[in-house]
Amino acid sequence: MSSSTPTFPPDFTWGVATSSYQIEGAVHEDGRGPSIWDTFCATPGKIANGDTGDVACDHYHRWEQDLDLMQELRVGAYRFSVAWPRVFPEGTGRLEERGLDFYERLVDGLLARGIEPHVTLYHWDLPQALQDAGGWPERRIVDAFVAYADAVTRRLGDRVVSYATLNEPWCSAFLGYGQGEHAPGLSDHAAGLQAAHHLLVAHGAALDVMRANAPGSRHGIVLNLNPAYPASDSDEDALAARRFDGFFNRWYLDPIFLGAYPSDMWDAFGANVPSVAEGDMAVVSKPIDFLGVNYYVRTVVAHDPDAPGLALRTVAADAERTGMGWGVYPRGLTDLLVRIDRDYTLPPVYVTENGAAYPDKVVDGAVRDADRVHYFARHIEAVQAAMQQGVDVRGYFAWSLLDNFEWAHGYDQRFGLVHVDFETQERFPKQSARWYADLIARQGRAAAGAAT
């Protein structure tokens, strides 16, 4: 960031983020039950190179080292997820105290280092036993999630600064049940829509018990949002972009903030629309204390009458791309934040994930990832631009602290600020980590100077 860029508010949260299955490993230890990702990884052809999360970053055993790394990098907050099968190995019923003990040690370790704990309850690792009973398309899962949320928030309580019920329900529902790219690997559009509905109902249903157990914490949800731009000035492309926005963004934003699914998408989905019980939308739209926004890419959309479903196709319009092949478009983050602030009455917003994979090379014991530094700098400036237009953004979490298990991509894609050698589990900060630490320090010095 340039020296002329205005500083962020002194209470702005600077953090890093991870998720349980991507870093913890130890999948058979201390009573943890199998998750849908353990099953998916064991299915031939689903994960690049046949990789699994069995060891991942071995964070379950190396968590103190990882917390020390965060302290070294000066981050003020750590967003991590709890593994549901560590708490309830069969999804419901028997509570595994050793799982809760691990997360309690983690929270206490963060607080001892002056780092805020921010917990996500569900980051995709559903207990396999619940999937065997039907998974998210089955209504009974709502009660199971509420019991799980109750157990975690009862144990960790107000020591956690914020609890997010769900991470990216679009991915859980559509990549998992609608398109088969993620666990549990089903390809059924109607099942994806029903899963999405039950995810949202579970979110709303858990809020009351979460607030009762941790009244001093903030409670919300994390959505991955993807701004859609028409490929041309034509009305057809504009309408196609609107349909994509309805499928990807409004299908979640509208129920949470307006108490109803978007009518245009309800009509477009036809016979595939979910079964909605009386009172569901009042549950889904319970007030939340914050909205987490994960941003990685924009989508450029063209009308295509021959395309199945929503009659649209995406257009590759970005020249600069990450290692994942994702176009880099920082302005999309500004546009997205300003747009949702305009269209909805929002609580405070946190950018809970933002980052990029690049083909890092270790040279002379270092990773000089200038592309990632440039990516972060431009996206943080994009957050600031949205704040200057009135959006109440309270924090930014870089994805991710560590190179980790990147779902169907296995270990081929590295998002971390910290390099991980997956053979030796050696860790060392990359150039981007040093840059981020310096940014946080400069923000702190600027805030201190403004206070004198």
Image (cartoon, rainbow, N blue to C red):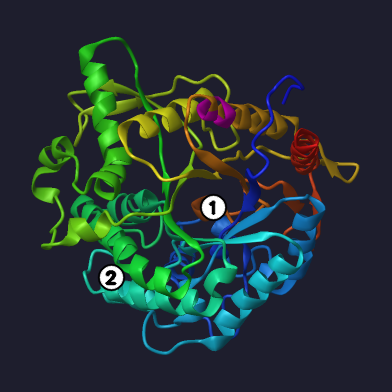
Residue identified by numbered label 1: 48
71 or 231, nearer to the observer: 71
Q: Which residues are drawn in magenta?
A: 383-387
34, above or below 439, in the image: below
What residue appears at the point 52 percent right and 39 percent down from the top-left corner? 393
Residue identified by numbered label 2: 142
Label 1 – label 2 distance at C-alpha: 32 Å
From the top left corner, tell me how far across and down residue 56 is, in percent: 64, 63
Looking at this rendering, what residue extends furthest in the bottom direction? Answer: 94
162, above or below 178, in the image: below
Q: Is the Cβ of the residue at disc 1 closer than 8 Å to that at disc 2?
A: no
From the top left corner, tell me how far across and down residue 439 is, in percent: 75, 37
Principal SS element in the magenta part? Answer: helix
Quadrant of res 345: top left
What residue appears at the point 41 percent right and 51 percent down from the top-left corner? 168
Choose mark 1 or mark 2, whichever is in front: 2
Amino acid at circle 2: Val
